Image (cartoon, grey):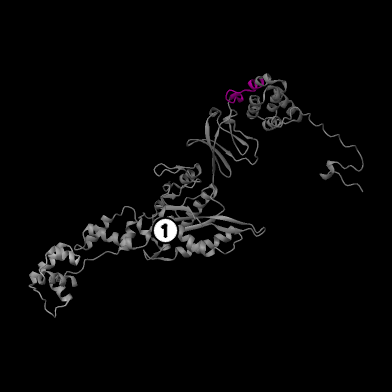
Amino acid sequence: MKKIREVLRLKLGKGASTRQIASSCKLSVSTVSEYLYRAGAAGYSWPLPEDLSDEDLERSLFPPRPKTGEPPRPLPDWNDVRKDLSRKGVTLLLLWREYKAKHPAGYGYARFADLYSAWEKKTDLRMLQRHKAGEKLFVDYSGLTARVIDPQTGEVREVQVFVSAMGSSQKLFAKAYEGQDLKNWLLAHVEAFEFYGALPEVLVPDNLKSGVTSPCYYEPGLTKAYADLAHFYDLTVLPARVATPRDKAKVENGVQQVERWVLAPIRDREFFSLSELNEELRRLVDALNSRLMKGPNASRDELFKEEDLPAMRPLPASRYSFAEWKSAKVAPDYHVEFEGHRYSVPYRLVGNKVDIRISTNVVEVFQGSKKLASHARAVRRRGFTTQDAHMPENHKAGQWTPERLTKWAEKTGPEASLFVSRVLASKAHKEHGHRTILGVLRLEKSFGKDRLEAACQRANTIGALSYSSVKSILDKKLEKVEPQPEPPALPLHGNVRGAAHFQGDVPCAN
């Protein structure tokens, strides 16, 4: 080193002080002292021998350490260590103990852990988080959408791409859906489980409103439907924290891979149906899953078969059926309403809030986790579905009886009383008319007694025995308008065929 020679020249040839030499050569005082000490021990004086090169000078002052002759310590295959760590119950300490049992002269635990950590940082980013095999499935939507063209109209619509990734193997699932609504969100989960052919223990979604109502990491609030799906498959749902992508790094990376290797290559292609698009997505995702990854030197498919699949649970015998949830208050007629149709519950629950679960064929009513009623879903949007067991004795619905409703109507006027009588007479069960009557009589608060009486008179005249009809009369101020008379009957004539002809009952005259 040239600086060693310069230090010796200034000290032995010029007699400069150690601090002066350190300042001149841009070295620390301790380094200058070390050079001078070693030069003195080696017996050097100034001037140095002419045939002494800088390299020889450095080797003479700093000779290499003698080799002990011991063989290098053995190292494990770090890929095998990583695979073992993904298995439940396996720790790095356990693997080190097994390593020491095979190689007693091997590294101590602290050095073993440091070496593994250094190897892990040099491999693919997927190594930065350790996930137990088969434990977590990360789910999200891609930021990029795909396009589908209507072959009839040429209309182009954007469709959403759902992506999921297993925690350990990072195997990907991607499929396009019409939107991010609740029904498509749940369907995407079901089809992801069927794609993997098994179930994880934990779901890690983003805080999509379709699934998460309260984005708390420790006590997340889930929508009723999402909680229903989790209960059906016996899953734990742990939503990622808000603005914390590291919580779902697997699917963030998976989404990036799907966008780069699946969606970007088909950006200019035209698809004329969702099934056609999904067929191409499946082909490209399969190719991505079979591609070799640099870090583990294996494909996602291989890692999934080796690590995740053996640790996952089998799918249930039946498939989850989408169900919609809504909250309702039990009306005085001890029914709850969905899509205009009313379903009975035990009459003792009048005034209570309940949850309604609506699947394709069944309507169920719950209070907490207790099921109160179950009905076949009605095809008609109006009407009642009533079970006799839900009805009180003497057809009492809470405190409301036909007699009490009639007396209340009499205070408004004779037309209101007649309206109540006709509504009650039109129902198979009088209680079915209670909600209509209560709604009509309460219109008095908004429109006054006189207007309500006039509206009931018009409703009685035209036979409009519903709450919506009476309210429409009041809203449009039709109670003072005379009803239009019925058009006169057509006279009998040979050229007048009548309605019966068009029903095929009368032959055409020649």
Q: Position of residue 12 (x, y in %)?
A: 10, 71
489 sits left or right of 475 in the view: right
Residue 166 seen in render: no
Q: Residue at x 17, y 75 (%)?
A: 54
The quarter of the displayed image where residue 3 is located: bottom left
- In the rendered image, the vertical position of residue 441 relative to residue 211, given as above or below: above
- In the rendered image, the vertical position of residue 268 relative to residue 402, given as above or below: below
Furthest residue toward bottom:
51
Q: Amino acid at mark 1?
A: Gln
Badge 1 element: loop
| Residue carrying label 1 | 170
Q: Residue at x 45, y 54 (%)?
A: 198
Q: Position of residue 171 (x, y in %)?
A: 43, 59
Q: Position of residue 437 (x, y in %)?
A: 65, 27
The quarter of the displayed image where residue 495 is located: top right
- In the rendered image, the vertical position of residue 393 relative to residue 145, given as above or below: above
Q: Nearer the viewer, residue 242 or 409?
A: 242
How many numbered circles does the render carry?
A: 1
Q: Nearer the viewer, residue 482 or 385?
A: 482
Residue 490 seen in render: yes
- In the rendered image, the vertical position of residue 398 relative to residue 110, given as above or below: above
Region in magenta: 393-406
Q: Nearer the viewer, residue 123 or 358?
A: 123
Residue neighbourhood size for the residue with mark 1, other residues' Cα within 10 Å, grouped as few (<14), some (14–19), many (≥20): many
Q: Nearer the viewer, residue 388 or 81?
A: 81
In which quadrant is the N terminus drawn?
bottom left
Asked if the magenta segment contains residue 405, the reply would be: yes
49 sits left or right of 354 in the view: left
Q: Position of residue 122 (x, y in %)?
A: 33, 63
Asked if the magenta segment contains residue 391, the reply would be: no
